[in-house]
Image (tube, rainbow, N blue to C red):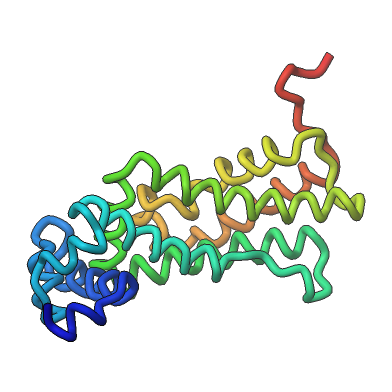
């Protein structure tokens, strides 16, 4: 075994895989391509990731974890819960738009990879809805927001703003009025959080 193969790490493989995917696209990229980029045999890659599917899922999780780190809400900026929620949703929308317009190949590649595993969408959405829930919970604690079920409310907010973060709507993000539409939806959500109660799972009497 070469010194390069012995020093090979999972993180190095994932970084190389991302570059290979960017260069060739998900349909053509292979484990052999990754191995060539690293200067090792494909067997060395398989010692870290047993299958091509496992490797592609791992690189997708790595990419999503970077998104999760950036999107982790902050509560140390002296903002109200409404301001924090609006800023967080705006940050998400801006990030998705930039990805689609500035690096469309990589954006498209990762949409393919996310769909390859049933576990990945649940993993990602679970994190993102969880972030929304943390913001709503903070608002409930300060009595700015009112809800009987933080988790269900967070999911409702995520669903209501789908047009502004789901890749299926990417072509709509170039509409010159899309920011106005975003502002209107978020304002409606915040008004609802301030003054209304989301019905419990069993339904209100």
Question: Which residue in the rendered view is the most extreme toward the right?
Answer: 143
Total marks in image: 0
With respect to residue 155, does 17 lie above or below? below
Q: Tell me where residue 176 appears, x and y as whole percent.
A: 45, 64
Q: Residue at x 49, y 58 (%)?
A: 178
Q: Tell me where residue 164 appears, x and y as whole percent.
A: 49, 54
Left or right relative to 152: residue 170: left
Residue 44 sits in quarter: bottom left
Picture quarter with the N terminus:
bottom left
Residue 19 sits in quarter: bottom left
Residue 18 sits in quarter: bottom left
Q: Residue at x 63, y 50 (%)?
A: 130
Question: Which residue in the rendered view is the most extreme toward the bottom?
Answer: 3
Q: Is residue 39 visible?
A: yes
Q: Is residue 184 visible?
A: no
Q: Tell me where residue 189 appears, x and y as whole percent.
A: 70, 46
Q: Nearer the viewer, residue 14 or 22?
A: 14
Q: Tell me where residue 169 appears, x and y as whole percent.
A: 39, 50
Picture quarter with the C terminus:
top right
Q: Residue at x 72, y 53 (%)?
A: 134
Left or right relative to 122: residue 72: right
Q: Nearer the viewer, residue 198 or 31?
A: 31
Q: Nearer the viewer, residue 67 or 199?
A: 67
With respect to residue 52, does 91 lie above or below? below
Q: Residue at x 62, y 65 (%)?
A: 72
Question: Which residue in the rendered view is the most extreme toward the top?
Answer: 205
């Amino acid at each position: 075994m070469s010194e390069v193969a012995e020093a090979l790490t999972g993180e190095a493989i994932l970084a190389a895989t991302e570059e290979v995917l960017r260069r060739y696209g998900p349909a053509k990229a292979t484990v052999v391509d990754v191995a060539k980029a690293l200067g090792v045999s494909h067997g060395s890659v398989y010692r870290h990731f047993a299958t091509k599917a496992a490797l592609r899922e791992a690189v997708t999780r790595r990419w999503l974890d970077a998104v999760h780190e950036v999107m982790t809400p902050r509560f140390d900026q002296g903002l109200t819960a409404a301001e924090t929620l609006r800023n967080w949703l705006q940050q998400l929308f801006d990030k998705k738009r930039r990805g689609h317009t500035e690096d469309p190949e990589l954006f498209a590649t990762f949409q393919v990879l996310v769909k390859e595993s049933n576990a990945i969408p649940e993993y990602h959405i679970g994190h993102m809805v969880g972030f929304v829930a943390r913001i709503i919970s903070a608002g409930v604690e300060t009595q700015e927001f009112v809800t009987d079920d933080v988790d269900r409310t967070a999911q409702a907010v995520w669903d209501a703003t789908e047009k502004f973060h789901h890749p299926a709507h990417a072509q709509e993000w170039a509409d010159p009025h899309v920011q106005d539409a975003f502002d209107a939806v978020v304002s409606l959500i915040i008004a609802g959080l301030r003054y209304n109660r989301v019905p419990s799972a069993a339904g209100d009497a």
